[in-house]
Image (cartoon, helix red, strand yellow):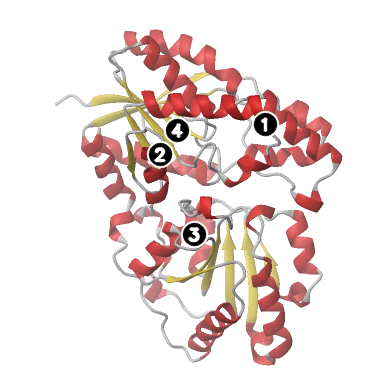
C-alpha cells in the first residue's frame, strides 16, 4: 500500500544539535513503520546555536528534503553585542547581569521581530510551499516551533489551501513561556504576539503539546490540543544500567543548556555546605556539566567550595552525552521557577529515565515533571527554596553509592519510547 505523505516544516534538523532537533528527527525515523512518508522542509542556510554531526546517523536513508534560503538578523545582533549569540537558543542575560547593550538587544528582539527573528522566512515559504504541496499531492503538514514563526507558515498555507490538514506542534509555549515577560514588549507588540498565537490555535486542525499542562492550557485558549510528550530512543541507550561499573566518584551531572532563568542557586549552596561539613562527601563528590553552561553561573560556582569538584566537559555529541548520563549517579534537571512553567517537561528527562539513574529535579509545585518522576519512581522534584530536603536526598543517594547498594529502578517508562510516541502520533493523524 502506498504511504501517505506528510510535510514536516522544521527549523532544526541535523547537523543542528540540542533538544530542538530530536523530536521530529525521531518521528521521521519511525513514521514509515506506520504507513507515513515524511518529507522535511527546512532552511538551506540556517544559523544554528549548536551543531552535532552525529545526529546525521538518525536521518532516514533516502528521506526527501526540501530546502529554501532564509535571512536571519543574528549576524547584525552579534556585532552589536557578542552575548546576543544566546538569542539563537532562547537565552539572554537577566536582572543584574544585563548590560545596556543586552537590554537594547532584548527590546529589539521582542518588538521588531514578531514572533521571532526567523519571521523573514514566512512569506517566501508560503509562496513556495503552496505550489509544492499542490504539485506533489500532499494534504498533511506539520509546523514545529519554536521558532513560532514557522506556525505562521502553516497559518498562511491553511488560509490558501482549505483542504489542508495542519498540525501545529508546540515544543514550548509561545506567550506562556517564562522568558516572554523578559522581552520588554510594548503593549502593541504583546497584543500582536497574542493575536498571532490565537490565530494559530483557532485554525490548526490539531495543536500538539509536549506536556499535559500545556495541552490543557492550549485547549482553554481555543486549540484542539493533544499531548504527545518527548521521549527516548531505545537505539540510543548504550550500556544497560546493570552492566555499568561504579565510578570512583559520586557524580551529580547536569546535561544540556543551563541559563540564568533556571539556575538552581540553592542547590549550589547545599552542595557547598555538604563539602564544608562532610569530609567523606567532599573527597568523593564531583559536579559534572555536559553542555553549555552560562558563563555567569559557572563563575559563581567557581567562587565557592565547589571549585575543585567541577568537571566541565562542554558541549558533546548526543551519543557522548548519553554515555555521560550513564556514568553518573544522580542527574539534575531544572525548570523555570514560576507556576506558569509547571507544564514544561524538558526533553532530556526521558533519556534520564532510560539511563536508569535517579533524577534530582527543580521547578514549580505540581509540575508535570513531578508527576512523571512519581509515576516512574525515578527521583524527586523540589522547589527552588527547599534546603534540608535537598540535602537529605543527596545524602541518601550518596550513602547508597558508598555502600554499593543499587538505586531504585525506574518503572513504566516504555510509554515514552520514541516508537510508541510515533504510534500515538499516527493514530491522531
The secondary element bearing badge 1 is classed as helix
- Asked where in the image residue 225 lies, by quadrant, the reply is top left
Distance from disc 3 to disc 1, alpha carbons, whole Å, reads: 35 Å
Q: Residue furthest right?
A: 100
| Mark in the foreground, 3 or 2 | 2
Q: Work out whether residue 314 or residue 226 is closer to the camera in this orientation and state it.
A: 226
- Give the Cα separation between the discs numbered 3 and 4: 25 Å
Quarter assignment of residue 139: top left
Distance between the alpha carbons at the discs numbered 4 and 2: 15 Å
Local secondary structure at mark 3: helix
The span from disc 3 to disc 2 (Cα, nearest Å) is 32 Å
Q: Quadrant of the N terminus?
A: top left
**Residue 239 sits in which quadrant?**
bottom left
Task: Name the residue that disc number 2 marks.
Answer: 218
**In this image, 175 relative to 302: left or right?**
left
**Nearer mark to the viewer, of 3 and 4:** 4
Asked if the residue under mark 2 is in contact with the one under mark 4, i.e. CB atoms within 8 Å, the reply is no
| Residue of label 1 | 110
How far, Cα to Cα, is label 1 from label 2? 22 Å
Mark 2, Cα crowd under 10 Å, few <14 / some 14-19 / many 20+, is: many
- Residue at image position (21%, 33%) is 35
Which residue is label 3 attached to? 322
The image shows residue 18 at horizontal and vertical percentages of 55, 46
Q: Which residue is mark 4?
A: 144
Q: Is residue 30 left or right of residue 74?
A: left
Compute the Cα span from label 4 to label 1. Answer: 20 Å
Q: Position of residue 423 (x, y in %)?
A: 24, 43
- Which quarter of the image is occupied by the C terminus? top left
Amino acid at each position: 500500500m502506498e504511504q501517505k505523505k506528510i510535510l514536516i516544516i522544521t527549523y532544526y534538523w541535523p547537523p543542528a544539535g540540542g533538544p530542538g532537533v530530536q523530536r521530529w528527527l525521531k518521528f521521521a525515523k519511525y513514521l514509515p513503520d506506520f504507513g507515513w512518508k515524511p518529507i522535511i522542509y527546512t532552511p538551506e542556510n540556517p544559523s544554528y546555536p549548536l551543531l552535532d554531526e552525529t545526529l546525521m546517523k538518525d536521518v532516514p536513508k533516502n528521506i526527501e528534503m526540501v530546502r529554501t534560503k532564509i535571512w536571519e538578523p543574528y549576524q547584525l545582533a552579534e556585532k552589536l553585542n557578542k552575548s546576543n549569540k544566546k538569542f539563537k537558543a532562547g537565552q539572554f542575560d537577566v536582572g543584574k547581569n544585563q548590560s545596556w547593550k543586552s537590554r537594547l538587544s532584548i527590546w529589539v528582539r521582542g518588538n521588531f521581530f514578531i514572533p521571532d527573528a526567523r519571521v523573514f522566512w514566512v512569506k517566501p515559504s508560503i509562496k513556495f510551499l503552496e505550489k509544492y504541496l499542490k504539485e506533489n499531492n500532499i494534504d498533511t503538514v506539520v509546523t514545529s516551533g519554536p521558532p513560532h514563526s514557522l506556525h505562521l507558515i502553516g497559518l498562511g498555507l491553511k488560509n490558501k489551501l482549505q483542504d489542508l490538514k495542519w498540525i501545529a506542534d508546540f515544543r514550548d509555549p509561545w506567550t506562556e513561556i517564562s522568558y516572554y515577560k523578559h522581552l520588554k514588549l510594548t503593549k502593541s507588540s504583546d497584543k500582536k504576539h497574542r493575536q498571532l498565537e490565537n490565530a494559530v490555535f483557532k485554525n490548526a486542525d490539531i495543536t500538539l503539546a509536549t506536556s499535559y499542562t500545556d495541552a490543557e492550557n492550549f485547549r482553554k485558549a481555543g486549540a484542539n490540543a493533544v499531548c504527545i510528550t518527548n521521549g527516548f530512543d531505545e537505539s540510543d541507550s548504550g550500556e544497560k544500567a546493570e552492566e555499568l561499573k561504579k565510578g570512583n566518584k559520586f557524580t551529580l551531572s547536569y546535561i544540556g543548556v543551563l541559563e540564568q532563568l533556571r539556575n538552581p542557586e540553592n542547590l549550589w549552596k547545599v552542595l557547598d555546605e555538604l563539602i564544608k561539613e562532610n569530609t567523606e562527601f567532599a573527597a568523593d563528590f564531583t559536579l559534572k556539566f555536559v553542555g553549555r553552561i552560562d558563563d555567569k553561573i559557572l563563575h559563581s560556582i567557581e567562587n565557592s567550595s565547589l571549585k575543585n569538584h567541577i568537571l566541565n566537559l562542554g558541549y558533546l555529541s548526543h551519543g557522548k552525552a548519553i554515555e555521560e548520563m550513564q556514568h553518573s549517579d544522580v542527574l539534575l534537571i531544572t525548570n523555570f521557577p514560576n507556576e506558569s512553567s509547571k507544564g514544561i517537561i524538558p526533553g532530556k528527562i526521558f533519556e534520564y529515565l532510560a539511563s536508569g539513574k535517579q533524577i534530582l529535579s527543580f521547578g514549580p509545585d505540581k509540575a508535570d515533571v513531578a508527576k512523571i518522576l512519581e509515576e516512574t519512581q525515578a527521583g524527586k522534584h523540589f522547589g527552588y527554596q527547599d534546603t534540608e530536603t535537598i540535602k537529605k536526598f543527596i545524602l541518601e543517594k550518596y550513602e547508597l553509592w558508598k555502600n554499593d547498594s543499587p538505586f531504585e529502578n525506574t518503572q513504566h517508562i516504555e510509554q515514552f519510547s520514541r516508537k510508541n510516541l510515533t504510534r500515538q502520533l499516527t493514530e491522531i493523524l
